[in-house]
């Protein structure tokens, strides 16, 4: 700025006269001289500035930092499209204690490996020294075909029963044990070792004991986790009509393993937002959903013969027998004194069709003459006749207001019809699929049994 001011003063002092060609060289020389002066001045200024920085930084020369690059703000829609980081998978349920996995529910179809999965968890609990009762009407101990993992060397380390009334008695004892341990829990004193009750074929027990079983399971599931009394249930599905497991009771099971299940069971255990997945049969492969509905694949590894042999040399702990403690409840069930002894646990009533069964029956009986006509006169199959008369599972669900698009509602209708066939010996569609040669002969036998 001082140099520019000096040039302006110099220009003002130069006498004004007309510009001629002889002044061009003088002008060029003046411009070059000015450029040299400016360059030298700039160089001197930079050197002085570097000296000041070197003195300030302790003798080391630091280059000036580049200005930060400020990017334009990301559009809101683009930011929302970035996926959230995937949650960490839960710990493998086979490797954690019963207190960590809490109540467990295993649901799968035949051949998914439910028995071997129970054995894998049971052996792990025995290895950790926990008290185990295996209550199953299909105990693998009793048949060589089921002994893929031979548990007979461990028979002295756990208790087992296959009698239905005794299984129910064990559950009643567990509910009473939860009440007893809650006194120690409230006093903050030791309440006893963990107890895990493995219950297989839940559907069969529900058919025998009904609401008694449901209330007992609810008592254990709600309070048992606080006093280390845990359930390990195994079933083919979790429909309330088949097992008594309603939505509130299912939510109490922290660890859930799903195999090849129906759509209704998948939706009830995982949620409607995740597509139904199948698994290889008999491979010990399961889906484990977490609280958010995220599904993780889990493989259950069967214990080897060497594992069994190592655990078999363990000395059993001196603990009271659960089966002996459950005998009073078994006697009450046998003599039908449960109502007097346990007012809150009534004896299960005889099975009766629900309102849904009766509604389905009424719609089917109304359409049965037309179904018979379509099959005998037009020669169509029973599924086609059901479709034309709106008596298929999906159509019945829609007509009864259970669902507009089938799916879970259709499965519910199919389950109700199958349940009535098993429990009530009623066949709603007792119509054979006749061939053309047999229609005239067998038409008189096409009356429904329902």
Image (cartoon, helix red, strand yellow):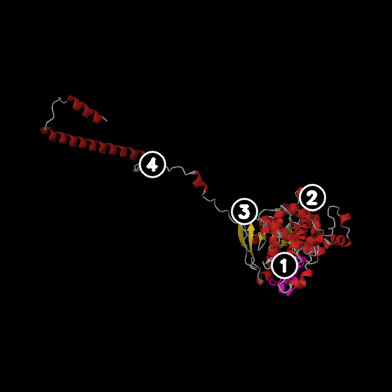
Q: Distance between the residues labelled 1 and 2?
A: 72 Å
- Disc 2 packing (10 Å; few <14; some 14–19; many ≥20): few
- Numbered circle sitting on residue 183: 2
In front here: 441 or 97?
441
Task: Write down the residue under mark 1.
Answer: 377
SS type, badge 4: loop
Task: Write down the residue under mark 4.
Answer: 67
Q: Distance between the residues labelled 4 and 3?
A: 48 Å
- Disc 4 packing (10 Å; few <14; some 14–19; many ≥20): few
Instruction: Say which of marks 1 and 3 sits in front.
Output: 1
SS type, badge 1: helix
The quarter in which the C terminus is drawn is bottom right
Q: Left or right of 19: which side holds 246?
A: right
SS type, badge 3: loop
Q: Does the magenta stretch include residue 146?
A: yes
Instruction: Say which of marks 1 and 2 sits in front.
Output: 1
Among numbered discs 1 and 3, the one appearing first in the sequence? 3
State the residue lying farthest toward the left: 22
Q: Do the residues labelled 1 and 4 touch (CB within 8 Å)?
A: no
Among numbered discs 2 and 3, the one appearing first in the sequence? 2
Residue 17 in the image: x percent, y percent?
Answer: 13, 26
Task: Write down the residue under mark 3.
Answer: 273
| Count of numbered tags | 4
In front here: 290 or 326?
290
Q: How far apart are marks 2 and 3 (CA)?
A: 42 Å
Q: How far apart are marks 1 and 3 (CA)?
A: 45 Å
Instruction: Say which of marks 1 and 4 sits in front.
Output: 1
């Amino acid at each position: 700025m001082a140099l520019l001011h000096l040039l302006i003063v110099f220009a003002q002092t130069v006498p004004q006269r007309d510009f001629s060609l002889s002044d061009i060289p003088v002008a060029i020389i003046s411009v070059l001289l000015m450029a040299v002066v400016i360059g030298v001045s700039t160089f001197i200024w930079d050197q002085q500035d570097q000296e000041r920085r070197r003195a300030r930084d302790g003798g080391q020369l630091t280059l000036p930092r580049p200005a930060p690059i400020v990017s334009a703000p990301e559009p809101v829609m683009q930011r929302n499209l970035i996926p959230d980081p995937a949650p960490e998978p839960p710990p493998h349920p086979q490797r954690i204690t019963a207190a960590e996995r809490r109540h467990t529910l295993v649901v799968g179809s035949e051949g998914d490996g439910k028995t071997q999965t129970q054995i894998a968890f049971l052996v792990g609990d025995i290895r950790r020294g926990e008290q185990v009762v295996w209550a199953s009407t299909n105990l693998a101990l009793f048949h060589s075909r089921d002994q893929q993992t031979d548990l007979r060397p461990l028979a002295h380390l756990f208790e087992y029963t296959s009698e239905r009334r005794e299984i129910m008695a064990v559950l009643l004892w567990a509910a009473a044990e939860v009440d007893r341990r809650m006194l120690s829990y409230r006093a903050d004193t030791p309440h006893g070792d963990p107890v895990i009750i493995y219950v297989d074929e839940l559907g069969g027990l529900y058919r025998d004991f009904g609401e008694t079983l449901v209330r007992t399971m609810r008592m254990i599931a709600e309070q048992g986790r606080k006093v280390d009394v845990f359930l390990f249930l195994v079933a083919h599905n979790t429909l309330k009509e088949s097992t008594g497991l309603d939505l509130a009771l299912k939510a109490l099971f922290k660890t859930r393993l799903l195999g090849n299940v129906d759509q209704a069971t998948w939706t009830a255990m995982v949620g409607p937002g995740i597509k139904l997945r199948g698994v290889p049969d008999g491979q010990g492969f399961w889906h484990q959903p977490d609280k958010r509905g995220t599904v993780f694949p889990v493989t259950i590894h069967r214990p080897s013969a060497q594992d069994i042999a190592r655990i078999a040399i363990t000395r059993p702990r001196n603990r009271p027998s659960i089966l002996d403690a459950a005998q009073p409840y078994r006697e009450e069930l046998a003599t039908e004194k449960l109502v007097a002894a346990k007012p809150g646990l009534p004896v299960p009533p005889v099975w009766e069709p629900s309102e849904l069964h009766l509604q389905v029956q009424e719609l089917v009986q109304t359409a049965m003459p037309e179904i018979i006509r379509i099959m005998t006169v037009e020669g169509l199959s029973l599924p086609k006749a059901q479709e034309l008369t709106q008596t298929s599972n999906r159509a019945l669900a829609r007509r009864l207001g259970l669902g507009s698009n089938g799916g879970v509602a259709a499965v519910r209708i199919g389950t109700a019809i199958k349940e009535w066939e098993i429990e009530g010996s009623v066949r709603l569609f007792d119509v054979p699929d006749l061939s053309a040669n047999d229609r005239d002969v067998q038409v008189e036998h096409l009356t429904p049994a329902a």
